[in-house]
Image (cartoon, rainbow, N blue to C red):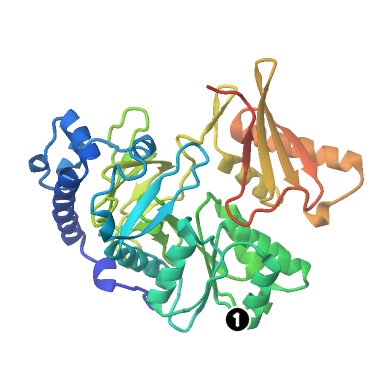
Amino acid sequence: MERRYYQPEIETMPLEKLRALQSERLVRQVRHVYENVPYYRAKMQEKGVTPDDIRGLEDLPKLPFLSKADLRDGYPYGLLAVPLSDCVRIHSTSGTTGKRVVAFYTQNDVDLWEDCVARAIVAAGGTRDDVVQVCYGYGLFTGGSGLHGGSHKVGCLTLPMSSGNTERQIQFMMDLGSTILCCTPSYAAYIGESLKERGYKPGDNKLKAGIFGAEPWTEEMRRDIEASLGIKAFDIYGLTETSGPGVAFECEEQRGMHINEDHFIAEIIDPDTGEVLPEGSKGELVFTSITKEAFPLLRYRTRDICVLSREKCSCGRTHVRMSKPMGRSDDMLIIRGVNVFPSQIETVLLNEGYTPNYQIVVDRVNNSDTLDVYVELPPEKFSDTVREVSQWEKSLASAITTMLGIKPIVHLVSPKTITRSEGKAVRVVDKRKLV
């Protein structure tokens, strides 16, 4: 099989050489942050650490963690590590749970970020002959800008569609012969559904690959998207805080995402104790940015739960792989004392033949948690027979109970009942007044 690399000398770098590069960049970055970010200098002093204590990768655990709370406390300029005049762009998180997090970029930061995304596009089979349709949102959200810039680096024809206006998305996709689709997985599923409604078959479009991220999705959802669009679907991972999409990406093996380790050092920790866990352990993902100039984060707690693996990859890349996030330590729902991740419910739905159009509603009635799962019936299952629908609801509730250990109330609703998302899907509504 032909190997697909954007920067082969880096992506296939021998591990010993890669670790030496990480150590060198870490030492330089720690000093840069200590000297230029008073907020972080105070955190290091509080822990009794100076730049002289950090001589390589083995000293990383000496550094304090950063959390989203620190980023909000430092809003807007408190974690900026270069003069504002050196910055050329900002991006921001949605701010749905408090103050926004604003991340700054120098031109070099933008260039390196786009290189990371270009690696992802080439790994998905992208070349200068491809037409890349970017349906991620533009603006403050990193998705659109990241895939747009990476596509340009590869030399692809880029369609900067942004999110929404599905009718126009389909028109341009068919008329201009898009070959790579970039959007959230839930929107990819919606596009596939919309194409089918218009009478198109998977082979009618010219798409060969999709690069999907920004929200959790399961292997079952991947298979559904691949079947509906006739493509190979690749995962991409990133955070606004560390740059955006392209921190990690899937290769043709589709068995985890390679982290761009020349730019990011990854650790897995116990989310409760902060203890660094050995390779192969399931825990919270922590990133240290070792090339970012304007907004470098050391030991940033992502709250994503995953596993890292250095098992040799057939693609030839040497960079460590991360699993799909298995949930978030801060988004995990505790219902009747049980830890519940929305992805567990989605897995059951897709295994049972339902669509990924669903919503989980959690409430508290008479001091007891309630769990309602609203799921759209596939068109071929839609029936006016109340008895049939009731039987399906009971069967699905039983399957979810087996997965979670707690019993939900399942509501099978008509197709198109649940609001479609053109960005990140709203999967969970928690009505409990939890303090």
Percent position of residue 347, x then y: 61, 46
Q: Residue furthest bottom?
A: 129
Q: Nearer the viewer, residue 409 or 430?
A: 430
Which of the image's four quarters has the N terminus?
A: bottom left
Q: Viewed as shown, does residue 372 lie left or right of 278?
A: right
Is residue 288 positioned above or below 47 on the image? Answer: below
Q: Which residue is mark 1?
A: 177
Q: Is residue 141 left or right of residue 384?
A: left
* x then y, percent, for residue 112: 30, 65
- Amino acid on which the number 1 mark rests in the picture: Gly
Q: Under tag 1, what secondary structure?
A: loop
- Could you tell me residue 76's position as x and y percent? 36, 44
Residue at figure coordinates x 63%, y 76% from the top left:
173
Q: Residue 372: image x %, image y %?
A: 70, 33
Q: Is residue 1 visible?
A: no
Q: Is residue 227 above or below residue 154?
A: above
